[in-house]
Image (cartoon, helix red, strand yellow):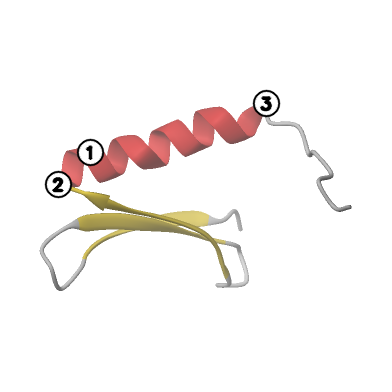
Amino acid sequence: MAGEFEVFEDMAGEYGFRLKASNGEIVAVGGSYDTLAAAKEGCAEMQRAAAGADVVDVVS
């Protein structure tokens, strides 16, 4: 099973999303969108960005 995005409304009435791995572990969180549609677009943007993203080592 692939991971999944969960879109939610927080107690302040703002929307966010979390990306869960197939084992249920939360691996990324995005939040503070004014609308549900904007939170869903944030999920879509993360999908697009991650597809071609490089891994960069910034450990000193």
Disc 3 on helix, strand or loop?
loop
Instruction: Say left or right for 49 vs 14.
Output: right
Mark 2 residue type: Asp
The residue where tag 3 is placed is 52
Question: Which residue is more in the foreground, 22 or 17?
Answer: 17
Q: Amino acid at mark 3?
A: Gly
- Mark 1 closeness class: few <14, some 14–19, many ≥20 residues within 10 Å: some
Q: Are marks 3 and 2 in contact (CB under 8 Å)?
A: no
| Camera-nearest residue between 4 and 13 | 13
Identify the residue at image location x=22%, y=55%: 15
Element assignment for label 1: helix
Instruction: Kindly report the distance in space between the C-alpha atoms of the residues bearing marks 3 and 2.
Output: 28 Å
Left/right of residue 14 with respect to residue 6 in the rendered view: left
**Image position, residue 35 (x, y; %):** 14, 45
Instruction: State yes or no: discs 1 and 2 in contact (Cβ < 8 Å).
Output: yes
Image coords of residue 10 (percent x, y): 20, 68
Q: Residue at x 78, y 39 (%)?
A: 55
The residue under label 1 is: 38
Distance between mark 1 and mark 3 Cα atoms:
22 Å
For label 2, the SS is: loop
